[in-house]
Amino acid sequence: MLELKNLSVHVGDFKVANISLSINNSTIHAILGPSGSGKTILVETIAGFHKPRGGQVLLEGVDITAHVPELRYMAYVPQDLALFPHLTVKENIYFGLTATGRHSEALKREADALAEALYIKSYYDRNTATLSGGEKQRVALARALATGNKILLLDEPFSGLHPGLRKEFWFLLKELQIRHHLTIIIITHDLEEAFFLGDHISILIDGMVHQSATKEEARFPRDKTVASFYGIRNIFPGIFSEQKLLIPKLNLALPILDAWAAQVEDGKNFDVGIRAEDLIIYDAERIHGVLNLSPEVISMPTLHGKITACFEKGHSATVIFSPVNSDILLEVEIPYHKMQKLFDGKRTDIALAIPPDRVFILESNRRQS
């Protein structure tokens, strides 16, 4: 296990403060956050390139805070990949062995096997300056893995690739991680990438960890800062009253769920939110005998209103729902084919079902350190 305990680092105008994380062996830990939040400083400190002002880096319980990078036995792939343009692909990959002082023929054969698996062995004699972006990414991964180190640090590794190629690399990285039992820390600002790859997700904003959780737990932001970074717009004031969670602006009363039990305090004010993709929208006029809705959906707290706008996004669409007699707007994410059926200008009674177990409670600017 790799552990960070109250780690604080300042580099120029950038800093991260009091970072405490546990990265389990043979897992992918995504560190997610906007540009300028300190993600690169954090991963470079883990790699040993910056001396922290406070705190510790522990590897299997051993304090390695003062160790130089080459004694940490971690492979680091920076944003710019740091390939040597004057060397061939083969020379770049073998450099990983040279840097660690391991030159055995067995290790070279393993490096060759990695290059074969990454479809770049046929490029061995080519200069890396002549490669495409995706090919360079494969060379950088092969060089990192050839070191034999089981901890891989990746700083925004796929940000320069187009969406189709980026997703191909996600599958490839997952495959390599499982096959080689790697522990991977990946830095990203891309929510989809973090949730696709990460077993655990830590959200770093303004140099602080606001939330660190499993993938499922991370879907529900803990404070408004994280919710804003996620782009969640369905956030409303709420209050607990008489064993109900009241959302006055939506004229809704939800039953108290076990997930909220620790936060329930009669008369307590807070904000609640729900992700656009968790809302269930349907044509209320066609509910009887036409729509294939489960009794569970039909029994959910429901708003009635109309769709005021629709934004197509290829495979999906964002629609804006306006409840009856209200100036409140809710954002709903739906599949494209469903949008075609709902948004034809003729639907006068659109229903919006709200699953109570997908509603989350936001604590005011809570940060986890």
Image (tube, rainbow, N blue to C red):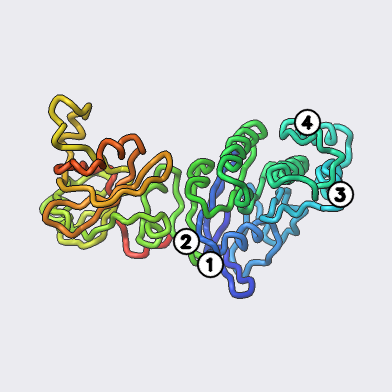
Q: Mark 1 or mark 4: which is in front?
A: 4
Tell me the amino acid under the disc marked 2.
Ser
Residue position marked by numbered label 1 in the rendering: 17
* Residue at the extreme bottom: 13
Tell me the amino acid under the disc marked 1.
Ala
Marked residue nearer the N-terminal end (2 or 3): 3
Residue position marked by numbered label 4 in the rendering: 113
Tell me the amino acid under the disc marked 4.
Ala
Marked residue nearer the N-terminal end (4 or 2): 4
Determine the secondary structure under disc 3.
loop
Disc 4 crowd rating (10 Å Cα; few below 14, some 14-19, many 20+) is some
How far is disc 3 from disc 4 in space, using C-alphas?
20 Å
Q: Which residue: 57% across, 60% down?
A: 39
Residue position marked by numbered label 3 in the rendering: 87
Disc 1 crowd rating (10 Å Cα; few below 14, some 14-19, many 20+) is many
Residue position marked by numbered label 2 in the rendering: 369
